[in-house]
Amino acid sequence: MHDTDLAQRGLALLGCGKMGSAMLAGWLARGLPPTSVRVQDPHPSDWLKAQGVHINEGFGDSPAVVLIAVKPQVMGDALPALKALPTGDTLFISVAAGIPMATYEAHLGTVPIVRAMPNTPAAVGKGITAIVGNAKATQAHLAQAEELLSAVGEVVKLDSEGQMDAVTGVSGSGPAYVFHMIECLAAAGEAEGLAPDLAMALARATVAGAGALAQESGEDPAQLRRNVTSPNGTTQAGLEVLMNEDNGLPPLIRATVAAAANRSRELANG
């Protein structure tokens, strides 16, 4: 990250929990000077204190970027702190789930805002983040947000903010669905006579390995599935249960994602 504007004017974080810390670790690893970073957080972690960044010393004069990474529940308390900021052409990037851009505009006025939805695999650099900008956000702003957020994984651009609820249901909440898949696979292995530790080791490595293969091979997941499935073999027997259109995984996952997306809409509408 050799953005001289960012290094000179600085980058400010409002909130630095798990997601903010994962992003900051990525930026520092890319060469952003710690002295260019200002963090406002009521409970800074020991890790954060050891990074050499400014903590709870204000936002500086006019930072190039302000990352809003506080939990949605405390947003009402946190946003007034930004009002005193002499914004100039500061870009605001929010990674808070469920908070529409209109909420920030109501507090901050007509400033460039990019709303982003990352997910927790960002903690190991394997996240995927969807972004969308408001009317004031230019292509250059979106490119800067994409560059920053790529420190923790892939970035995709949305056509409209309305798609954010579906993104929440798929990638935002999705890691939890996959973790539960690991739990279920391990429990099923136990039921078939495996020791709990062994069943969990098999389940965890299988889901992680399959995900890595799907990501890195570039092949269509349907083709990867067919590659494992011999005619009348063991995999086909399992898939006949899992792929049942009436009571298998397809209707279950559709209902799961729909429930999460609907809840996201409810939260956005207050």
Image: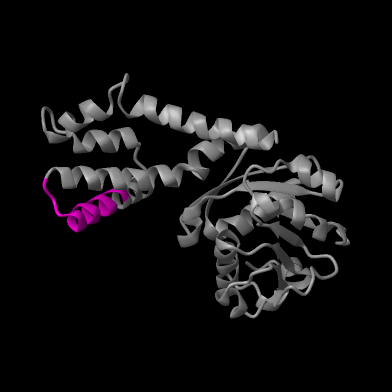
- The residues colored magenta run 193-207
State the residue in front, 190 or 216.
Answer: 190
116 with respect to 79 (left or right): left
Instruction: Give 29 or 242, whichever is nearer the viewer.
Output: 242
User: Which quadrant would residue 28 be assigned to in this image?
Assistant: bottom right
Name the residue at 49% across, 38% down. Answer: 170
User: Would residue 130 be counted in the magenta stretch?
Assistant: no
- For the image, the number of numbered tags is 0
Does residue 46 lie above or below 140 as drawn?
below
- In which quadrant of the rendered view does residue 40 lie? bottom right
Check the image and report above or below for 256 versus 28: above
> For the view shown, which residue lies furthest in the top direction?
246
Q: Main secondary structure of the magenta part?
A: helix
Relative image position of residue 135 (x, y in whole percent): 79, 40
The quadrant of the image that shows the N terminus is bottom right
Pinpoint residue 180: horizontal percent, then vertical percent.
36, 44
Foreground residue, 172 or 62? 172
The quarter of the image holding the C terminus is top right
Q: Position of residue 161 (x, y in %)?
A: 67, 36
Give the residue at x 60% y 78%.
51
Q: Residue at (63%, 47%) from the top-left corner? A: 116
Residue at 75% across, 57% down: 78
Residue 168 rendering spot, x and y as whole percentages: 55, 40
